[in-house]
Image (cartoon, grey):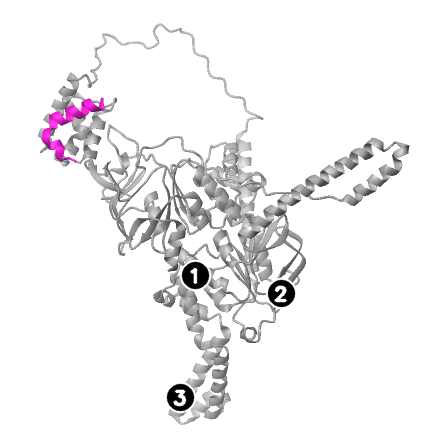
Amino acid sequence: MTEVVSSVVHEVLGRRIEDVDQPIVDYIVNVLADEDFDFGDEGEGAFDALGELLVDSGCVTDLSECRSICTILCEKFGKHGLVKAEPTVRSLAMPLRMFDGMDEEVAPKKKPEPVDGPLLTERDKLKLERRKRKEDRQREVQYQMHLAEMEAAKAGMPVVSVNHDNSVEGTTVRDIHMENFNVSVGGRDLIVDCTVTLSFGRHYGLVGRNGTGKTTFLRYMAMHAIEGIPKNCQILHVEQEVVGDDTSALQCVLNSDVERAQLLEEEARLLRLQRELEVDGATGSSKEQLNGDANNDNIAQKLEAIYKRLEFIDAYSAVSRAASILAGLSFTSEMQKRATRTFSGGWRMRIALARALFIEPDLLLLDEPTNHLDLHAVLWLESYLVKWPKTFIVVSHAREFLNTVVTDILYLQGQKLTAYKGDYDTFERTRAEQMKNQQKAFEANERSREHMQSFIDKFRYNAKRASLVQSRIKALDRLGHVDEVVNDPDYKFEFPTPDDKPGAPIISFSDASFGYPGGPLLFKNLNFGIDLDSRVAMVGPNGIGKSTILKLIAGELQPSSGTVFRSAKRRSGAMLLCSSGERGEKKRTAPLRFVSIRHNEEETCQTAERLQHDDVRPRVRIAVFSQHHVDGLDLTSNPLLYMMRCFPGVPEQKLRGHLGSFGVTGNLALQPMYTLSGGQKSRVAFAKITFKKPHIILLDEPSNHLDLDAVEALIQGLVLFQGGVLMVSHDEHLISGSVDQLWAVSEGRVTPFSGTFQDYKKLLQH
């Protein structure tokens, strides 16, 4: 049928059709070949659907010629039997009763479905409503109490600053031995009767499932709440971002050296008094100001002592050291001079990390330090921590980061901490071998016990074998028990498969440019596409605009110029698209026109767009995961209640099942969310955004806060997901396992990167 339609179109339009782009010709042919297409009276339907397109593409000169061409097309198609015959219509002489000939018996009414339990009266409903409000208030009160406890705990943290006495003579704190300690929160035991020794100069990676108590353990250590930690041990837990004020980023780092700041302040005061003494000739007023400084000689002696101390603590290199650390964390010279209040929370966390590295405490505690860093900063931090002279403990979801910086692993499982030598890969191999040997020992022990017990049971009442039975009983007691291997339950991330699949392209950018109002263009002439089989990771430095591109794709932002296409349902034989242009004229219907879209700078296709948004019902469903969605969770409620509020009317069992597909099962689904770990909250956010079965998933640093097992489960879930994936991440293991293409974002453009993530890392390192 398509060949016949194509030949008729070429016959009617003649040579002019040869000058038109092939995708436009294909579109015209496909519209006319549609089985449900209605040509109308004398081709009116064809004129309405394709008239303006034929004029815009140059197939005809004006609308009057277009109308005649559509009439000719209708006649030609009619000769080929491609135009549906109009149904015969006749007037009725009298009204027709639709129920004539049917039984006059009244159809039985549908019986109401039985309701479990008694029907609720209005009074009962009011009682339930009051009880619900009371429970909401109680949850809010409990949450506020939790916040107050957290603030009190943070206020109780000892202030840590640069300690110059220890840095010169050698630290007085060497190994830290913590014996038989417990850690609990909210009445729940996290660590019980544990003994751990931290050797000086070793670099520890703390790993374990989300919710096992890793962060709480670090907080206990920072508060010196565990027996065995020396009182003079400086412990710094990098958990909070610095306060935003008018202090510059560089000065904020330098202010952590309290002694240096006090010496410089005293130096400035003495120099000012010395100048006044020289100018005023030691007048009465200046003598009153000097008071305790007596005379010029006394000032000189104090200045000499200050200069010696400044040299002793290496104060004059402090600025360069602080600036070097900030530069390594991607702060430019201009950014280092900016006030801290002008930075976002992520950048203020970087300043807090820079302060910690500048202070060099006896024990440094880092909780997910790579969460707010780009790849360049992560690589710099790796090289800096490898040379760290003292002890640190780091919690991280990044396998490659742990393999690079740690010398030992602390594994938290079953309320116990176990130490392993080596990096994370070595830990995995060692633990797997231990589990294998333990399982063998358990099975051998069970076989021996079963054999002995069988002998005892068989001859227990045999007098001749009494001595043998007693011997076996004693041997059984001496045999002891071998603990059965207890593995953590397997994680799973099951992304639901969309029931419907829109046609390609799902999302396309055509010469799209974007800049925030009043600012310069961030991106210019973006051309790319995303389909159901796309597996893409965007890489580039922080602040380059990767998250902005995700918002453009999701429709949270609109381009300043160009077109962003999102697949939509068709109406009246025309393809309707979400448009970006002329956003101020939402009520005006613009003509249907074609624009050229380039996919990855290789494929060129044609898509139609209409500027009236009200006539478009989007077909493609997009799910967006970012830290904003995690932070937006209602922490006063539990995961199940939160999902019930987000999707009212959905059966509780279905919501429980969906939460379970992301590892939020059993009692975890009923815990208040403020008691959940960061990774558990992330899994709730994943469940919420994927409930509607999206076609495309946009992920902004999805592995942040997830534990290493959860990252592995996320990789498996994304591999099995039957939809498109576009992520922003610097996690090498996640990217290598779940995507097959890299896009590099730089200089306002998005370009495919020909190579692996390892190649991209090498490019940054050179």
Q: Position of residue 195 (x, y in %)?
A: 66, 57
User: In the drawing, what numbered circle is on residue 175?
Assistant: 2
Near-viewer residue (187 or 337): 337
Work out how far the residue at label 2 is from the one at label 1, CA to CA, in angstroms: 28 Å
Left or right of 584 on screen, residue 667: right
Q: Main secondary structure of the magenta part?
A: helix
Give the quarter of the figure containing the C terminus.
Answer: bottom left
Q: Residue at x 25, y 22 (%)?
A: 36
Which quarter of the figure has residue 9? top left
Work out how far the residue at label 3 is from the one at label 2, CA to CA, in angstroms: 50 Å
Q: Is residue 172 magenta?
A: no
| Residue picked out by circle 3 | 275
Identify the magenta region. 1-20
Q: Amino acid at mark 1?
A: Trp
Q: Amino acid at mark 2?
A: Asp
Mark 3: which secondary structure? helix
Mark 2: which secondary structure? loop
